[in-house]
Image: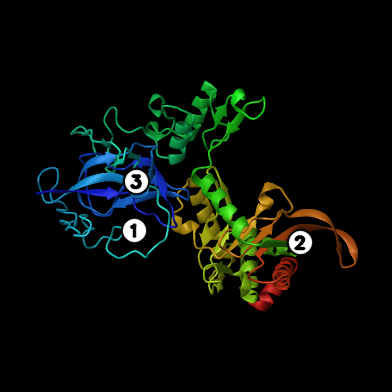
Amino acid sequence: MAQVLEFKLPDLGEGLTEAEIVRWLVEVGDVVAVDQPVVEVETAKAMVEVPCPYGGVVTARFGEEGTELPVGAPLLTVAVGETADGRPAGDGSGAGTAGTDGASGRAPAAEGSGNVLVGYGTSEAPARRRRVRPAAPVVNGRSRAPEPLREKRPADAPSARTGRTAPAGGPVPVISPLVRRLARQNGLDLRKLTGSGPDGLILRADVEHALRAAGTQDRTNTTTATAVPAEASAGTAPVTRVPLKGIRGAVADKLSRSRTEIPDATCWVDADATELMRTRAAMNAAGGPKISVLALLARICTAALARFPELNASVDTEAREIVRYADVHLGFAAQTDRGLVVPVVRDAHTRNAQSLTAEFARLTEAARAGTLTPAQLTGGTFTLNNYGVFGVDGSTPIINHPEAAMLGVGRIVPKPWVHEGELAVRQVVQLSLTFDHRVCDGGTAGGFLRYVADCVEQPAVLLRTL
């Protein structure tokens, strides 16, 4: 006898309280195995494929693509115990028959499940204090659950995971979540488009062309704007309101918390980067993978943090303690179509310039594709912010909470400079350090920044300290 179990949207980590359904990977009637991804969701941090901890037949889905669900809301239900043709669930898949948890009435994942989710899986998750939004609205004292999608797919309609061609009326041929989002934000029906990609795949260019033809494309391409009539605004002119949600809302919350909690200060210095650029050119002329300027600056950062470990830290406000880290997990600012994200290079202090270059490239590509996981966007201990790519010289960046410091790097441009007692044209860069004044005084921050500048001006300084 099959047992119907409800799989709820799990806690995806780092206090995330909601996620938007981007794409369903299974349909009602599909047989799923333990740990099989069943839905792709977008959080404020990244795109995530959510695996189901149960094996069996999908009997219902909750929420259409584009729906935002709170953590704890139902995602789908699975009949555990037998498959659609009457065989035991997991037959041939290793899923087996799940037992029940007497305390909750929910069956745990079968033994061997590797994807441990908070509230599911094979091991206990660490306790977490967070604010969770209600799973469903309450009307007249009663909880109203979302309506499930119970339409049975046709018998000849293959699973979204099989790779076979869908029947007429099946899924729209779109792979990119960014393309779906762009169309959804501008009210464009993808089913009416003909894709120019392979096998009719709808590309971003197809959507943008359709929006230009309709004259409705949102110039920001990031979120839906709502025009407010003139009579409803404070003045006589209309205003535009842009919701602070998704990644923009997450960034706003993080930066506001940083400015509220951290007493930050900034110091800066101009440095002659001519020798650093010559060193990079010589390294790249020697053959092998090309070394990026960002990788050289990151290598300088890790060496500076070894000399000034006070800045590789955070503050535990509840315990009133400074927490210093032995390892350097280096975050770097990356601008994407979805907004500013900060991927983290793990154990940056153990990497050479070549390894750092490769890792920066890998994470940047994932950031632009929207495939970074929450784990790749969290856990940093220090951030490197290269705002010179925007053509500016200086900035006073806001610290990436809960870290204690951030190094900012402006553009490297030819400027007049006194070199060896004479005026010359040199490659000059402005460096700035914003730091948490609770973890150190100005002398430590100044010493860190001066060491970084010395390494930029004379790369041999770095070699002498390795």
Residue at 70%, 71% (x, y): give it. 441
Instruction: Identify the disc placed on residue 135.
Output: 3
Instruction: Identify the disc placed on residue 31.
Output: none
Which kind of residue does numbered mark 1 sit on?
Val
Q: Which residue is mark 1?
A: 118
Q: Decide: few, some or many residues near mark 2? Use Cα within 10 Å; few <14, some 14-19, many ≥20.
A: some
Which kind of residue does numbered mark 2 sit on?
Thr
Q: Which residue is mark 2?
A: 274
The CA distance from mark 2 to mark 3 is 58 Å
Of the numbered discs 3 and 1, the one sitting upstream in the chain is: 1
Q: Position of residue 242 (x, y in %)?
A: 56, 36
User: In the displayed structure, does residue 332 sit left or right of residue 459?
Assistant: left
In front of the other: 164 or 255: 255
In front of the other: 461 or 143: 143
Q: Position of residue 115 (x, y in %)?
A: 31, 58
Which kind of residue does numbered mark 3 sit on?
Ala
Badge 3 marks a residue whose secondary structure is loop
Residue 198's image quarter? top left
Q: Is residue 252 above or below residue 145?
A: below
